[in-house]
């Protein structure tokens, strides 16, 4: 087959233990509606490497002889790059895919990783909040999927490939199904079916209620921490300590560290932080630089603009909808008893004041929450045409997922067919923490070796 080399360049190619990696950089339109300006999007193409092979391997030959087993991985986020492979066991889902004979493409979605980055100075250089939003809108799932199609056409032409989407990558995979289903052989999703039938209230209630339950479970495991947290919150409310990078550790920012409850080891991480903060306040009356740095780095908002700005806008699916700070409003209902419960990430009205790097972009965030001109991401009428015979979709869902409602995920069966497996074995980061097991379960689902 002929490779469309005019679409991309090979930035590097190298061997890492038992894998070989090629870094491919594609030139894509910033705005597919006005394709006069381009940005770069990179993929890490990974194959198994057998010792004794020439290190000057030919990635084109690898693809050409493996056209039936090309898999594109879409990372969670929004706004996070795929992990840079170090060996076949990192990322942990890579090795089982390679053993199954797949050539794996790890996409750095536009604006992330090796792709053209987005940073604060770039956003400010665009001028008004309206101009900044116009730019930011070019980094939603529909543009990501058009990038994927450009990559597919450049590398495998008319051949189909398989998707593996995790979390927000599953949202993107569902978008792919609604835009270009004919390009896909099959779709694997872990913890990432979007809530197509749910409204914003249902989405917020799931997220906040699950985080509230996690908080209560955390206190059951570490019963002394409830009183400790109350003291910490009182200190933060009165002192509003300044973080090493100039941000503020407000009670609301501290509250969002509950995002770690959705990850393996998250309870332990939070317990250590709370004990450390408590002992420092008891002995010195203030928090140390080291502890403040840990709390500061516990959120990805400072370093990842897409992750920050698209926390709630990822649910906007056209139809004149706007987010209107919906999570913050529902939080008042879920926390009506006045107790302090940890939460996942969300936008509260003063959030930009608490993050030093985001203060100058406060007008943009306010505009995002009132804007109602979002393009459609998931075309439901097209998704209704999907059947297992036309495009098999396989989903491994985490029971009581803190980020992706199991109930709303399952409700998608009223729109399109998919095979699913609901598991209690993993938290939301299961494919990162236990990639071998998750990939095995997904392919057991593919092979019909489970009940559903």
Image (cartoon, helix red, strand yellow):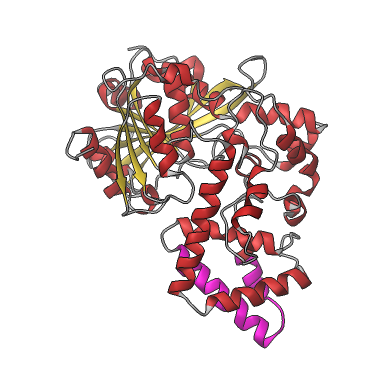
Can residue 192 be seen at all in this image of the molecule?
no
Q: Eyeballing the image, is 406 above or below 128?
A: below
Q: Is residue 407 left or right of residue 355?
A: left
Left or right: where 230 falls relative to 83: right
Residue occupying image coordinates x 22% and y 36%:
100
* Quadrant in the picture for residue 23: top left
Relative to 51, 104 lies left or right: right
Q: Which one is in front, 196 or 427?
A: 196
* Magenta region, main secondary structure: helix
Residue 187 location (% of width, % of height): 34, 29
Question: How many numbered discs, if any?
Answer: 0
Residue 73's quadrant in the figure?
A: top left
Residue 14, above or below 338 = above
Q: Between 295 and 418, which is closer to the camera in this rendering?
A: 418
Along the viewing direction, whichever of 12 and 19 lies nearer the viewer: 19
**Would residue 138 be seen by someone viewing this image from the given angle?**
yes
Q: Residue at x 37, y 24 (%)?
A: 416
Residue 68, image x, y percentages: 26, 22
Q: Is residue 158 magenta?
A: no
Determine whether 5 is above or below 51 in the image.
above
- Which residues are the magenta region? 266-294
Q: Quadrant of the N terminus?
A: top left
Residue 48 screen position, x and y as percent: 27, 38
The answer to which image quadrant residue 237 occupies is bottom right
- Quadrant for the C terminus, please: top left
111 left or right of 88 in image: right
* Of the pair 220 and 33, the residue shown nearer to us: 220
């Amino acid at each position: 087959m002929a490779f469309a080399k005019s679409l991309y360049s090979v930035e590097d190619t190298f061997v890492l233990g038992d894998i070989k990696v090629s870094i491919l950089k594609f030139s894509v339109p910033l705005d597919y509606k006005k394709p006069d300006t381009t940005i770069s999007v990179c993929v890490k193409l990974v194959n198994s490497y057998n010792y004794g092979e020439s290190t000057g391997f030919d990635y084109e030959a690898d693809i050409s002889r493996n056209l039936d087993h090309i898999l594109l991985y879409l990372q969670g986020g929004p706004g996070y790059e795929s992990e840079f492979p170090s060996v076949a066991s990192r990322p942990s889902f890579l090795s089982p895919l390679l053993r199954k004979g797949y050539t794996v493409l790890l996409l750095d979605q536009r604006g992330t990783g090796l792709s053209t980055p987005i940073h604060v100075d770039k956003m400010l250089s665009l001028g008004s909040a309206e101009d900044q939003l116009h730019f930011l809108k070019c980094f939603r799932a529909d543009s990501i999927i058009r990038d994927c199609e450009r990559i597919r056409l450049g590398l495998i032409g008319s051949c189909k490939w398989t998707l593996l989407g995790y979390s927000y990558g599953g949202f993107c995979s569902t978008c792919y199904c609604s835009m270009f289903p004919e390009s896909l052989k099959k779709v694997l999703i872990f913890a990432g079916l979007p809530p197509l039938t749910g409204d914003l209230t249902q989405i917020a209630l799931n997220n906040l209620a699950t985080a509230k339950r996690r908080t209560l479970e955390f206190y059951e495991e570490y019963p002394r921490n409830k009183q400790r947290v109350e003291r910490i919150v009182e200190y933060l409310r009165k002192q509003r300590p300044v973080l090493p990078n100039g941000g503020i550790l407000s009670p609301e920012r501290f509250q969002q560290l509950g995002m770690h409850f959705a990850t393996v080891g998250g309870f332990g991480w939070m317990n250590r932080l709370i004990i450390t903060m408590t002992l420092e306040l008891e002995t010195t009356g203030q928090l140390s630089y080291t502890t403040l740095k840990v709390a500061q780095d516990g959120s990805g908002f400072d370093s990842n603009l897409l992750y920050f700005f698209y926390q709630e806008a990822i649910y906007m699916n056209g139809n004149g909808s706007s987010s209107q700070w919906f999570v913050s409003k529902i939080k008042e209902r879920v926390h009506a008893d006045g107790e302090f419960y940890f939460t996942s990430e969300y936008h509260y009205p003063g959030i930009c004041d608490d993050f030093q790097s985001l203060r100058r972009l406060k007008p943009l965030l306010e505009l995002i929450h009132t804007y109602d001109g979002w393009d459609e991401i998931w075309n439901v009428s097209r998704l209704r045409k999907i059947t297992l015979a036309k495009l098999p979709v396989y989903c491994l869902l985490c029971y009581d997922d803190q980020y992706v409602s199991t109930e709303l995920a399952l409700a998608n069966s009223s729109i399109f067919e998919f095979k699913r497996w609901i598991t209690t074995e993993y938290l939301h980061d299961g494919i990162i923490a236990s990639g071998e097991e998750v990939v095995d379960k997904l392919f057991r689902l593919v092979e019909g070796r489970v009940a559903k």
